[in-house]
Image: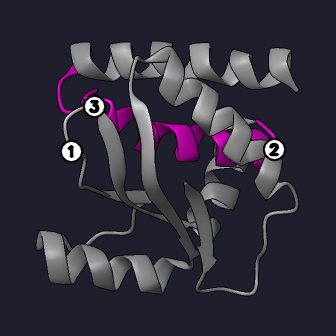
Amino acid sequence: MINFFYETDFKLNYQETLSLWIGQVISSENKSEGEINFILCDDEYLLKINQDFLNHDTYTDIISFDNRMGNQLNGDIFVSVERVKENAVDFGVSFDEEMRRVLIHGVLHFCGYKDKTEEEKAVMRQKENEKLLMFHVEH
């Protein structure tokens, strides 16, 4: 089950469509959907999580806590709406596209993809692009 929670005034308009797409992405990776919680928040909320749980004192767009059980994906994905808005401007894409990229980035981490090395980042970006195309084709 895909859940969306809000720690900010912002609300996604198309949660059901996103949930269906995320489920299709999970299936395309031969995984099963457990309980995935997306918590949309602001910079300060996510900074505190970064400081408290990861000992990082930096702003970020996403933090994911992976609780998968075998092939079943479970976990919490925290997303800073402020960072997504700023990144969309920086990357010259729409807010909606950048939000989808960040959401699916968290899910791809749960699928086992990493992004620490340049090689891992390249694979992650390729997977993000592949999954973003699924959104456009399916919906």
Q: Is the magenta stretch mostly helix, strand or loop?
A: helix
Residue 38 vs residue 91, the one in the foreground: 38
Residue at the disc numbered 1:
69
The correct choice, above or below, for 29 with respect to 31 in the image is above
Seen at 78% across and 73% down, the residue is: 11
User: Horizontally, is 136 left or right of 47 in the view?
Assistant: right
Residue at the disc numbered 3:
71
Circle nearer the N terminus (2, 3): 2
Please say whether residue 106 is one of the residues in the magenta stretch. Answer: yes
Residue 97 vs residue 30, the one in the foreground: 30
Residue 124 vs residue 38, the one in the foreground: 38
Seen at 85% across and 54% down, the residue is: 14
Q: In the image, which residues are magenta?
A: 93-118
Amino acid carrying label 1: it is Met
Please tell me in which quadrant of the rendered image residue 51 appears: bottom left
Q: Residue furthest left?
A: 55
Circle nearer the N terminus (2, 1): 2
Which numbered circle lies on residue 17? 2
User: Horizontally, is 46 left or right of 10 in the view?
Assistant: left
Amino acid carrying label 2: it is Thr
Q: Are marks 2 and 3 in contact (CB under 8 Å)?
A: no
Seen at 46% across and 56% down, the residue is: 36
Q: Do the residues labelled 1 and 3 touch (CB within 8 Å)?
A: no
Q: How crowded is mark 3: few (under 14 residues within 10 Å), some or many (20 or more)?
A: some
Whole-angstrom CA distance, mark 1 to mark 3, is 6 Å
| Residue 99 at least partly seen | yes
Whole-angstrom CA distance, mark 2 to mark 3, is 23 Å
Q: Position of residue 77 (x, y in %)?
A: 43, 60
Which numbered circle lies on residue 91? none
Amino acid carrying label 3: it is Asn
| Residue 61 at least partly seen | no
Seen at 75% across and 36% down, the residue is: 92
